[in-house]
Each structure stands twice: as C-alpha cells, then as structure tokens.
Image: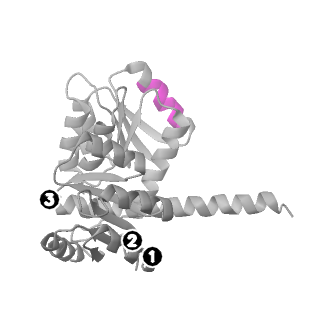
Amino acid sequence: MRVLLVDDEEDFLLSSAQALERRGFHVDVAPNGVTALEKIDRVEYQIVVLDVKMPDIDGLEVFRILHQRHPSLPVVMLTGHSSLEDAFQTSRDGIADYLDKPIDMDELARRLRAIAQRHRLQPESGDGVEATGVGETVRVMVVDDEVDFLQSIKAVLERRRLSVTTAESGEAALELLAENLVDVIVLDVKMPGLSGLDVLRRVKCDYPSVQVILLSGHPSVDAAVEGVRLGANEYLQKPPDIEHLAGTIRKLHQEKLAFVQNQQEKLIEEIRRRYPD
C-alpha cells in the first residue's frame, strides 16, 4: 500500500515513515501542503495521512484542494488539538479518519488497512455512484415527521440505488426495525413523541450494528455531544447535501460490515478458546 505522509515536523515525519515501512507500507513524505499536492498529482497513492497544522497551507485547505482533484482518494487527518466538533466536521466533509497526536503506530497501521479495505469494497462506478459490492443492497431507513421531506429524500436516494423505507415517527421506526433488516438509519433529532436521541438510544441498545446518521435543522453542540455519547455515527445539518448523504450512507454501510465481521471473528476465537480440541 502506497501512503503519502504530510507533516512539517521533520522528526515526526521521518520516524513515522520508518515505523510504517516496518509494518509493510510503502511511504512517501512531504514536509508541507504544496509539496504534497505536487506529489499527489504525479503519483498514485492509496491513502494520504495529513497533519492539520502546517505553515504554508493548513491541512484542511490541502484536503479541500485534494478532494476536488482526487475525490476518491481517502485522507486521514492528524491533529494535536482535536475536539468532537472537529471530528464531526471533518467526517462530514469526507475525511476517512481523524486521529490525535501523539499516534500509536500500530493503531495507525490498523486504521490505514481498514480504510484501504473499505475502499477496495467501494469501486467507483461509471455514473459516479459508489457500489458496495456485486449484488449487494444498502438498506436505509429515513425517520422524520415531515412527510414532504420523507417523500423527496426517498426518491432521490432510490435513484442512487439505495433501498429506502420511511417512518413518520420514532415509534413507527422502532416497529419497522423489529420486522425489517436495516443497515443505516437517517434520523431527525427533533420529532414529537420519541425524539431522535430517544430512538438512537434504543437502536444502539437493541441493534448495535445498525449505523445512525442524525439530522438536525437547528444543530447544537449539546445535541452533537449527546449523539456521540449515545453512539451516533454521523451528525448532519438539514437539508443535507444529497450526494454527501448518499456517500456517507455507503461509507457507514461498509463500517457496519466491518463491525459484523469483527464480531464474528471474536465469536470464533471464543469458541476456539472454550473448545480447544
């Protein structure tokens, strides 16, 4: 796997490159954003690892330029001063992962391999819509008390080859969930009766592998923090950008597959431990 590591701290850059190469990666380095963009235009990388704070062009600006030129190239953002707000924002913008400095190199290597695996499962199709695998359907439930919004978003998501069911309340969503397999739920925060956060709490308790995107017309830090605490996988503002929403749904679907696979592996290991013969 060919990785570009971008950071203005020379000691960190060289030691991290050596550590990743010992773990089986082919690593190029760039000491600033300008050099990074020049290299990315010339060389085909699988992943870019990018520091937020750099002197010429900061990491977020490099990412914006990079994302315009190479929208399918995954980017991991590094920072020494992270926050929940930063993590939500960068994830919403399309960054593949967000890690704090100082970084454990084994953890970074694990994250890079997981991201590469997700992207191998998501080749770009001819019409710009990412596929999730041959014959595989992403099952989405949209929960909102605004009927017009439900009808319109169902139509546009189905045009992007997603299988969509809708629910006009939290109570209806939980009833449907008990009877239907769902990969990703798109859930309005503000609803009469059971709120989005109430539904999120129930979903993560009863269906932990289901991925949840919270939607809010009036986003707040408190709601975002509470959503993270309860297990929300993403937090978007209404009305969402449809292309970004569809891409986020597909990304979370792959994370669900990885979660299920991990649970299966744990179960296999537990069986082997209990029954070594």
Q: Nearer the viewer, mark 2 or mark 3?
A: 2
- Residue 178 got which mark? 1
| Residue range (magenta) | 13-21
* Identity of the residue drawn at 19% across and 72% down: 150
Q: Please give the residue where the numbered disc 2 appears in the rendered image.
A: 174
Q: Nearer the viewer, residue 48 or 98?
A: 98
User: Disc 1, disc 2: CB below 8 Å?
Assistant: yes
Q: Amino acid at mark 2?
A: Leu
Residue 258 as seen in the image, left or right of residue 224:
right
Q: Please state which amino acid type lies under the numbered disc 3.
A: Pro
Do we see residue 94 in this rendering? no
Question: Closer to us: mark 1 or mark 3?
Answer: 1
Q: Secondary structure at mark 1?
A: helix
Q: Tell me the chief SS of the magenta region.
A: helix
Q: Nearer the viewer, residue 28 or 82?
A: 82
Q: Decide if residue 7 is on the left or right side of residue 20.
A: left
Q: Earlier in the sequence, mark 1 or mark 3?
A: 1
Q: Earlier in the sequence, mark 2 or mark 3?
A: 2
Q: Which residue is mark 3?
A: 239
Q: Looking at the figure, which quarter contains the C terminus? A: bottom right
Q: CA distance from mark 2 to mark 3?
A: 23 Å
Within-10-Å neighbours for mark 2: few <14, some 14–19, many 20+? some
- Colour mode? one colour
Q: CA distance from mark 1 to mark 3?
A: 28 Å
